[in-house]
Amino acid sequence: MAIEIRGSTDETLDAIASAFEAYSADRPGVEVAMYRQSPYSIRVRVLDPAFETMSRGERSRLVWSYLAKLTEDQQADINMLLLRTPEEIRDSFANMEFEDPLPPILLNGAKVE
């Protein structure tokens, strides 16, 4: 089990990590990485070998069942939830954005610092 919070942490990231501790206790071989992209945006990647036999919808329902204990505001901060097997990650464009994100941009076109 590996849960990695990249960069600085906060109450919401800690709560999400706690939810994934329960998930990973039930599912051996899981790797979870997360980071705050902006004040209102958290990105999460879950690599689970068991996803191989699951549809995208099944994966999502399973993971969100663990995230259901989070507050509505904490859930709303998760704007990227990447659910892949370790093999799928190599060809995932979403993973490229997860690993090397573009800076967030405000509606006026300015970058968020």
Image (cartoon, rainbow, N blue to C red):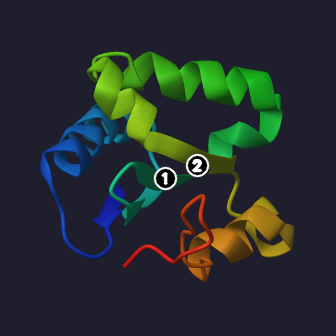
Residue 101, numbered circle: none
Residue 6 image position (x, y, % from top left): 32, 73
Task: Residue under label 2, please give it.
Answer: 80
Q: Residue at x 60, y 69 (%)?
A: 98
Whole-Å distance between the Cαs marked 1 and 2?
6 Å
Residue 88 in which image quadrant: bottom right
Above or below: residue 84 compared with residue 112: above
Q: Which residue is depicted at the point 31% across and 32% down?
A: 74
Q: Is residue 36 left or right of residue 58?
A: left
Query: Which quarter of the figure has residue 21?
Result: top left
The circle drawn on residue 44 is 1
Q: Position of residue 47 (x, y in %)?
A: 58, 54
**Residue 25 seen in this snapshot:** yes
Q: Indicate which label's residue lies in the foreground, 1 or 2.
A: 2
Question: Which element carries disc 1, helix, strand or loop?
Answer: strand
Residue flagged by tag 1: what amino acid is it? Val
Q: Residue at x 25, y 50 (%)?
A: 13
Q: Position of residue 107 (x, y in %)?
A: 60, 58
Q: Quadrant of residue 90?
A: bottom right
The local secondary structure at tag 2 comes to strand
